[in-house]
Image (tube, rainbow, N blue to C red):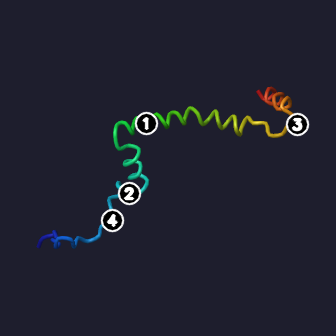
Amino acid sequence: MSTEQSYAPGEYPDMPPPSTEVGIIGWIRHNLLSSTTNIVITVLTIYFLYIIIPPMLNWIFFDAVFTAESRDDCRAIARAAG
């Protein structure tokens, strides 16, 4: 007995798509890694974000002075903090 089934044209059973073609993995493969140019742009963008985001977070949140009466007070507090 054969394990293969034959179907009439247009009557193929519905099958789920391969897991590498859908979801986050499929999206990344088709949109970010689909060509050499896209790979280079993706790597450069990730590197740029790696360089830019940490200093930006320090400036916006970690080293920011939120409570001061004037601009001079802010500068004095920032200088004292290092």
Mark 4 / mark 3, whichever is N-terminal: 4
Mark 3 / mark 2, whichever is N-terminal: 2
Mark 4 / mark 2, whichever is N-terminal: 4
The residue that appears at 75% across and 36% down in the rendered structure is 64
Q: Which residue is mark 2?
A: 22
Q: How far apart are the two marked residues, 2 and 1, measured between alpha carbons?
A: 22 Å
Residue type for callout 1:
Ile
Tell me the element at label 3.
loop
13 to the left or right of 61: left
Tell me the element at label 2.
loop
Cβ atoms under marks 4 and 3 closer than 8 Å = no
Residue type for callout 3:
Glu
What label does residue 41 carry, if any? 1
Q: How far apart are the two marked residues, 4 and 1, measured between alpha carbons?
A: 32 Å
Mark 2 / mark 1, whichever is N-terminal: 2
The residue that appears at 49% across and 37% down in the rendered structure is 46
51 to the left or right of 72: left
Q: Which residue is mark 3?
A: 69
What label does residue 68 carry, if any? none
Tell me the element at label 4.
loop
Q: Give the label, 3 or 2, closer to the camera.
A: 3
Residue type for callout 4:
Pro
Viewport quadrant of the N terminus: bottom left
What residue occupies the far right of the structure in this picture?
Answer: 69
Where residue 18 appears, as percent x and y from the top left, is 32, 59
Q: Few, some or many C-alpha atoms within 10 Å of disc 4 (few <14, some 14-19, many ≥20)?
A: few
Q: How far apart are the two marked residues, 4 and 2, measured between alpha carbons?
A: 10 Å
As displayed, is residue 82 above or below residue 33?
Answer: above
